[in-house]
Image (cartoon, helix red, strand yellow):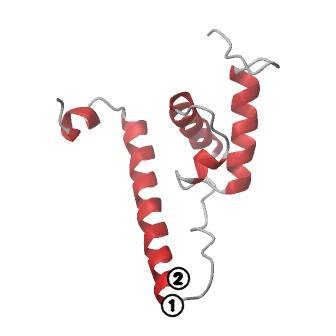
Amino acid sequence: MTSEWEELEKLSKDELIIELVRQRWLYKDLRLQLRYMSEEEGQYAGAPGQIPSKEWQKKIADYVFPNVKDGGYEDLMTWGVDEAVGEALFDEYFKEHFDENGKRRRT
């Protein structure tokens, strides 16, 4: 069984940055959820996502989507990406990697 350290050392610098940003976003989201729950302010909608540069949007999509089964743009929201950006990224990624029948294209 490999340790978390051994798993992380296999990642590229870009992948590590993506993972770090996700963990920061999840922590921020958790803190906001706890605050809303303790103050009983109603339903919590989630921490706002960020709008990464076009270069990082592609890197994030290429990192996240190949590892997701039956996913959608919502998957990017858990990585700290703004909802509208996530939706556009998913559409671009789907068009690039899948045919009109939803079958993955061979690369």
Query: Given the current orientation, which residue lies at the most extreme bottom position?
Result: 39
Query: Given the current orientation, which residue lies at the most extreme top position?
Result: 106
Tag 2 secondary structure: helix
**What residue sits 44% from the left and 53% below the top?**
21
Q: Position of residue 39 (x, y in %)?
A: 51, 90
Residue type at the position of mark 1: Glu
Q: Dots 2 and 1: beta carbons under 8 Å?
A: yes
Q: Residues within 10 Å of mark 2 (few under 14, many from 20)?
A: some
**Closer-to-camera residue (104/84):** 104
Give the side of residue 34 with respect to residue 97, left or right. left
Residue 44 position (above or below residue 75): below
Q: Position of residue 45 (x, y in %)?
A: 63, 70
Q: Quadrant of the C terminus?
A: top right
- Residue 24, by quadrant, is bottom left
Q: Which mark is residue 36?
A: 2
**Closer-to-camera residue (3/89):** 3
Q: Which mark is residue 19?
A: none
**Closer-to-camera residue (56/42):** 42
Give the side of residue 87 with respect to residue 35, left or right. right
**What residue sits 61% from the left and 66% below the top?**
48
Give the side of residue 87 with respect to residue 42, left or right. right
**What residue sits 74% from the left and 53% below the top?**
84
- Residue 83, by quadrant, is bottom right
Q: Residues within 10 Å of mark 1 (few under 14, many from 20)?
A: few
Q: Which mark is residue 39?
A: 1
Tag 1 secondary structure: helix
**What residue sits 67% from the left and 17% below the top?**
104
Q: Position of residue 47 (x, y in %)?
A: 56, 68
Q: Quadrant of the N terminus?
A: top left
